[in-house]
Image (spheres, grey):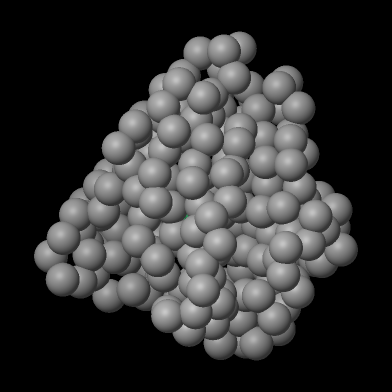
Amino acid sequence: MEIASGAHVLARYLNLTRQRALLDACRALVDGAVPAYVPVVRGGGKMHVRMLCLGRHWNGRTYRYEPTRSDFDDLPAPPLPDAFRSLAAEIAAAAGMTLDADLCILNFYDTDGRMGLHQDKDESPASIEAGNPVVSVSIGDTARFLFGGLKRRDPIEAILLESGDVFVFGGPARLRYHGVSRIIQNTAPPELDMNGRFNLTFRRY
Ligand SMILES: O=C(O)CCC(=O)C(=O)O
């Protein structure tokens, strides 16, 4: 469903088998050799997610991408798995767009996780101007996702993103403000046997 020009929600795009496989991959990554961590941002506040960047690291202090995590432990960002890159391309195509992703920001929200309203504007100007979409995949508990306009004060729509839903925003929607106001506890499919929510955003730098 196109909710705004360039912004598509594909409800339950991933079936349970694919959700389970992605969940296993996410769990292995966040507890792997280069683990997820809680970023501290420019103003000194802690984010309300555990984050792991793949392909390129997003530095929460500088709001820039870099190869190693200079704001945390200097470890190199793990590579973007090929299966993630093809998943992102497949989903973008399902929304009528194209994406050759070279990075993914993987966030884990526990039951009181959230993310303030922001624009995704730290990718290269060329990528943003080209309208390359951000492909977002949700696994686990439902999120109350906020989707606004190109200005912070524009009206905001709340959308529930459930496990297996994907959200694609590119072209004229690429710089729309968005965030997550809350996670709705105990809403993950029982088959996933999890609390909290993984969100993967695939992007092209
Ligand atoms: O968790 C979500 O659905 C949104 C994540 C997000 O806004 C981001 O990673 O920039």
- Is 60 located above or below residue 198 in the figure? below
Q: Residue at x 44, y 59 (%)?
A: 179
Q: Position of residue 143 (x, y in %)?
A: 49, 42
Residue at the left extreme, as displayed: 44
Q: Residue at x 37, y 75 (%)?
A: 64
- Is 113 located above or below residue 192 in the figure? below
- Is 159 located above or below residue 70 in the figure? above
Residue 152 visible? The answer is yes
Q: Is residue 155 left or right of residue 16?
A: left
Rendered-image quadrant of the N terminus: bottom right
Closer-to-camera residue (106/149): 149
- Is 106 located above or below residue 55 in the figure? above
Q: Position of residue 169 (x, y in %)?
A: 67, 66
- Quarter assignment of residue 22: top right
Residue 103 visible? The answer is no
Closer-to-camera residue (117/129): 117
Q: How many marks?
A: 0
Closer-to-camera residue (79/152): 152
Q: Position of residue 29 (x, y in %)?
A: 45, 34
Q: Residue at x 42, y 80 (%)?
A: 153
Q: Is residue 164 left or right of residue 179?
A: right
Q: Residue at x 35, y 48 (%)?
A: 114
